[in-house]
Amino acid sequence: GAGVSQSPRYKVAKRGQDVALRCDPISGHVSLFWYQQALGQGPEFLTYFQNEAQLDKSGLPSDRFFAERPEGSVSTLKIQRTQQEDSAVYLCASSLGVFKYFGPGTRLTVT
Amino acid sequence: KQEVTQIPAALSVPEGENLVLNCSFTDSAIYNLQWFRQDPGKGLTSLLLIQSSQREQTSGRLNASLDKSSGRSTLYIAASQPGDSATYLCAVFGQLTFGSGTQLTVLP
């Protein structure tokens, strides 16, 4: 595709449910990033992949958060046993060089 | 830990006005700084990227400056238009540390 796509665009989950958020980066982009953006705040870094290798996961807030990119293209961010504080927009970005290209995000609401 | 602050949090101006958005960061050892635009319900669009060795970058009506020694960057928007209404975010490169943004409204 022409840009980074994310699915679903909106997700409502009941507290305690597991969710999986998908990111399709721009074809050929080596680097992939996940960010979490709370309402009224700037995005905060979660994790970074270079191809299939997860090089930095220092921003993941707890062990309930898990990300993978098994074939170096599509990535999935999984949140287990969701809690209300997980409600946010989850943004994915990919890059080949310095510029990062962001997807539209997935808005997660935990009720 | 790098901290990025943007002031003001919100700004409303009449159409045609020139304006300046401010961004400050605590660690001057940055690699580069990037300004983004975010429209409601959409992702971030990169506007300008300034390498650490540069002092400014220009694109159309936008001009971004960088002063590493004082830990500041500004985004200048000339002749603002209603279509410029959005949230503007600055981010310091590495994994990108973002400010919380300035929500700009340009009134027709």
Image (spheres, rainbow, N blue to C red):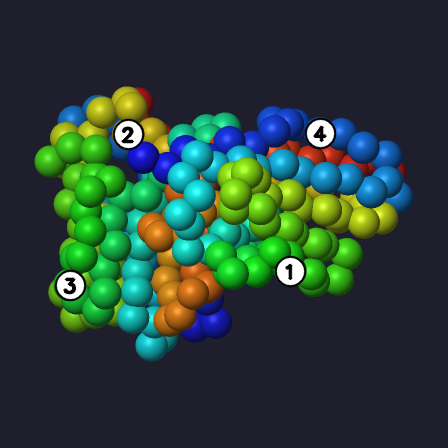
The label nearer to you, 3 versus 2, is: 3
Labelled disc at residue A53: 3
Looking at the image, is mark 4 or mark 1 nearer the viewer? Answer: 1
Question: Counting other residues with Cα less than 10 Å from the Cα at mark 1, is it few (<14), some (14-19), or many (20 or more)?
Answer: some
Q: Residue drawn at (46%, 31%), measured in percent from left and top?
A: A41
Do residues under tags 4 and 3 come within 8 Å of each other at their CB atoms? no
Marks 2/1: CA–CA distance: 37 Å
Q: Which residue type does callout 1 highlight?
A: Gln
> Which residue matches tag 4?
B11
Q: Secondary structure at mark 1?
A: strand
- Foreground pick, A42 / B2: B2
Q: Nearer the viewer, mark 4 or mark 2?
A: 4
Q: Are marks 2 and 1 on the same chain?
A: no
Q: CA distance from mark 4 to mark 1?
A: 23 Å
Which residue is the extreme one toward the front? Answer: B69
Question: Do labels 4 and 1 touch, CB within 8 Å?
Answer: no
Can the viewer see residue A14 in this picture? yes
Q: Are marks 3 and 2 on the same chain?
A: yes
Point out the residue furthest to the left here.
A63
Q: Are marks 2 and 1 in contact (CB under 8 Å)?
A: no
Q: Mark 1 — on which chain does it sit?
A: B
**Host chain of mark 4:** B
Residue on which disc 1 sits: B57
User: Which of the chains bears the disc numbered 2?
Assistant: A
Residue at numbered disc 2: A86
Question: Whole-percent x and y of residue B1?
Answer: 32, 35
Which residue shows up at 52% across the image and 43% down it? Answer: B69
Which-is-in-front pick, marks 2 and 1? Answer: 1
Q: Residue at x 69, y 61 (%)?
A: B58
Q: Chain of mark 3?
A: A
- Residue B1 - label: none
